[in-house]
Image: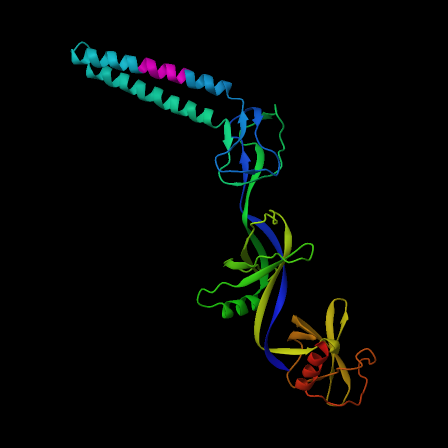
Amino acid sequence: MRIDTSFTKEYVSQIRSVRNIEIRAQEKGFLQNIYVDEGQFVKAGQLLFRIMPKFYEAEVLKAQAETKSAEIELANSTTLAEKNIVSKNEQALAQAKLDQAKAEMALAKLHLQFTEIRAPFDGTIDRLPKKLGSLIDEGELLTSLSDNNQMFAYFNVSEPEYLEYKANTKGGVKGRVNLLLANNKPLKYAGEVETIESEFDNETGNIAFRARFPNPDKLLKHGETGKILMTVPQKDAMVIPQKATYEIQDKRYVFVVDKNNAVKSRLITITGELPDLYVVATGLNDDEKILLEGVQKVKEDDKIQFDFEKPEEVITHLRVHAE
């Protein structure tokens, strides 16, 4: 029987922070201060680490002294040039020396600034692999920072399901999804599918979806797993009673009754599940009859006598009993 219906499908998902970055040292030196702890929430601009700055402080003082000297030299050269005692070239050379000294001072200040590592955005601190006093190389990992106010959930969808999704979300409408956590409890906040990758995976035939979930309770963490629950509408779907099927090695079968009243085993693929019903993707034609009762009592090529029941009546009977 074919009906217009919808069913909820589960997709394994990987949960990621909206922003998750590695915090690395920009200068080499000894780790002098750690101002945060693992799992701590920090604000943008908050000081996280300090790498021993003594060398860089000395470089700044040296650059400041050289800049002051160059300023004095330029002032003297300007006075002498105005009196035609020295050439304009001498004055220009003094100006160039001052510009170079200022550039070196700016660079020294930048290196000093790099000894203080601050949070680029609000987030939660991950593990701290280095301890106080550790010698840190330039570029060495100090921690990771995750913005967990909102979370991404990535999941893979087959090509037919992708086409169905696009057909039902025209006009910029975003699909609503729910998230089942690892403890089989649903997240109380619904999410939205906001983007789909541009290519299908050649090996799996799937395409990756990304849904965004609010996370005001900070329940979700970067790297967590779960299951996306997405309602999939399907028009003219073929449905059969679940009790008409049997399973062998994770594959689903039915017995089809041929024109000689013999039963033949048939492999089918299931695309969705409803109360007491399966949505069949492949394996059956509309005009074929399947065995409803006694599935466990027959075997291949058995001839049977049967009473035919209309699919509408069978499904109605199932629903009455389910209620």
Relative side of 6 to 62, left or right = right
- Is 140 in the magenta? no
Residue 274 in view of the camera: yes
Query: Quadrant location of residue 81?
Result: top left
Position of the N terminus by quadrant: bottom right
Quadrant housing the C terminus? bottom right
Labels in figure, total: 0
Identify the residue at the far left of this view: 83
* Range of magenta residues: 62-70
Q: Which residue is drawn at 67% across and 57% down?
A: 185
- Rendered image quadrant of residue 227: bottom right
In this picture, residue 15 sits left or right of residue 302? left
Q: Residue furthest top?
A: 85
- Give the image location of residue 98, x and y in percent: 31, 19
Picture residue at 20% right of the left edge, 11% below the top: 80
In the rendered view, would you say 14 is above or below 320?
Answer: above
Q: Where is residue 10 in the image (x, y as percent from the top left)?
A: 64, 63
- The rendered magenta stretch, by its main secondary structure, is classed as helix
In percent of width and height, residue 18 lies at 53, 48
Up/down of 191 relative to 284, above or below:
above
For this view, does 192 lie left or right of residue 204?
A: left
**Identity of the residue furthest to the right in this view:** 297
| Residue at 59% over, 75% down | 5
User: Where's residue 219, x and y in %?
Assistant: 61, 49
When the figure is inspected, residue 159 is found, relative to residue 118, above or below; the finding is: below
Whether 67 is among the magenta residues is yes
Is residue 206 visible to the viewer in this orientation of the structure? no
Image vertical order of residue 126 relative to residue 98, above or below: below
Between 229 and 135, which is closer to the camera in this rendering? 229
